[in-house]
Structure formats: C-alpha cells, structure tokens
Amino acid sequence: MRGTQLRRAFLGILAAAVVCTAACASAVRAADAPRADMPPWSHGANDPAVRRGLEFTVPEVDNLPDFHGDPCRARLAIMVGGNYYFAMAPLVAAFSKAHPELRGEIYYETIPPGLLARQIIEGGTITVGNMTWTVKADVFAAGIRGVQAMIRRGYVRAPAVPYVTNDLAIMVPKGNPAHIRSLADLARPGVRLVMPNPRFEGIARQIQAALVKAGGNELEDAVYVAKVKSGETILTHIHHRQTPMFLMQGKADAGVTWKSEALFQERAGNRIAHVSIPAEQNSTAVYAAGVLKAAPHPRAARAWVEFLRSPQALAIFAQYGFKPYHP
C-alpha cells in the first residue's frame, strides 16, 4: 500500500514538473517574442542580405530597424526617406529578380530624408549607439524638394526623377478612443498628440500647411506651439517609427502621418487605424530620386531610379496608397 502511495506521489510531482516546465518555456517564448508596439515590424523581410551570419536581434534593445542589408558588400546603396520603408522589401525583391547580379548586395537606409542628406554630406558616415560605419550612397530618394536641394548643393546629379505621390492622414489607435474626426479635433484640450518635428522631418512642413488650410494659423499654433509647451504634443525624431509606437503604447491619442504609413500598420495587424483628411485640407508629397555624383555604382543607381517608374514598382507602391506621379 505504501509503495502504491509513493508511486502516486512521485507521478504527481513528475506531472507538476512537466506542467511547470511547459509554463516556464511558454513564458520565455512570450518574453522573447517581438512586441507589436516595437519595431522592426517586417520580421526580417526588409533585410536583403543573403549571408546573414549570426542572427542577433532584440526587438526592444538591439534592432536597427532603419538600416537594411550588408554595408560591407553593397553594390548598390540607397538612401531613401523612411516614409515607405515597408515598400522597400518588395521593391528590392522585384528589382533583384530583374538584376540577379545584385541579389543580396543591396543596402538601404530609411531614416528621415533630412538626416540622410546630412549623412551624405558627412561622407556617408553615421553613428548609431556605439557603432559607426560609412556607406557611400548611390541613390538619394526623398520628397522632390529635398532631392532638388541636394542637386543645388552639388551632391546629386540632375534631374530629380519623380515617380509617386502621397497624402496625409491622421493616425489613431484602433477604435479611435479620443473620437478624432478631423484636423480641427487635434486642438481639443486633453487630446495628446505625437507630431513630426520640423527640425528633422520634411513632413512637418506639409502638416503645418494642412493645419493652416483646416483652421488657419490658430490651429497650427495650437498643435505646434501651445500643445508643445503644455506637453500635450510630443515631437518626434523619426515619426514613421515613433508615431505608431506611441499610439500603441497609450502615450498619445493621434498623430498626422502619411496615409501609406497608416495603411501599412493596419495591414500588419497592429492596433492602428486612420482618419482621412479631405482633399481641400490635405497636402500632397511628390517623391523623387537622383543618382549621387560620387556614386560608387552609377550603373546600378541609374537602373534603380528607372525601376521606380516601372509598372511593376508602381503596382507595389499602389498597395500602400501611393499614386503614380503625373506632371
């Protein structure tokens, strides 16, 4: 009898240990799983490198979400404004299929275009955290005025080649708990905003113009002056990452972004929605690209710029709400 009791006790302890082990393993997997409110959101799809070596990504600590590929082996280096970082993976895949000699040897960055321009002017050198590296750009892609400015400064060859356009939208958390319906609602007391900083991001100028259209200088001042002073407006360094993050983390109720960025977040299944802005209040961006005068790979650079206007590339852009550029 005693032997039977001991066996039962042992089996009970063993079962409890199995349950505990499974629970602990599940907890570890949950801890290691990337959070939806933390980039990168592409799950590795935006890394065009073939030889990746050691895989080491900690989503909340070490991820470098706006630097893609292998800078040491690059035979085409693209500096592209971050407003369509999510479209770059399918664009690079389609381009690489047409140019197999470049497969796995394309590098690109998707930080704000003003910062990319500064990096180009600094000779391609950039420091992120403890790491400093240098990449000589072949292509600069941004809003057409930004590309034209780099042409005037002597870094990019004329002409600036336009290819698509984009419109603004109001990004909100899924369910729109603050009941934002228009740009005018952004001035309501208590509505917390996350907005691009005019010092770093060209989109801020477009947003300010839209605010003036919607409510005059008073609305622009309320969003970009009064609420900044009161702390109800957070200004970003890199809105295409920070805006959706802060909305999903509950730090803000709304933020104006490009419509394409909101559509990507919705398509990715993140807790994001958007409110459309009427055409008469909206601002339209024209995206353009140019080949650097000092491009190490000018032939590949020209091929990329030509590809951006191809039916295949335009079809990819259309999936995220971009429209073909028409003069």
Image (tube, rainbow, N blue to C red):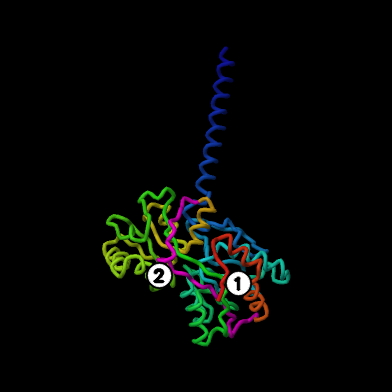
Residue sitting farthest toward the top:
1
Q: Can the viewer see residue 73 in this picture?
A: no
* Residue at the (67%, 65%) spot, across then down: 94
Q: Which residue is mark 1?
A: 71
Sequence-wise, the earlier of marks 1 and 2 is: 1
Image quadrant assignment for residue 47: bottom right
Q: Position of residue 316 (x, y in %)?
A: 61, 63
Inspect the image, locate mark 1, and give the three-letter code of the amino acid beneath it: Pro
Q: Is residue 287 magenta?
A: yes
Give the vertical position of 29 relative to 205 (above or below).
above
Give the vertical position of 137 relative to 284 (above or below).
below
Q: Nearer the viewer, residue 19 or 295?
A: 295
Q: Quadrant of the C terminus?
A: bottom right
- Say which of marks 1 and 2 sits in front: 2
Residue 299: which numbered mark, if any?
Answer: none
Q: Nearer the viewer, residue 59 or 186?
A: 186
Inspect the image, locate mark 2, and give the three-letter code of the amino acid beneath it: Ala
Q: How many marks?
A: 2
**Could you say whether the residue bearing mark 1 is in a helix, strand or loop?**
loop
The residue segment tinted magenta is 270-297
Residue 204: which numbered mark, if any?
Answer: 2
Mark 1–mark 2 distance (CA, rounded to whole Å): 30 Å
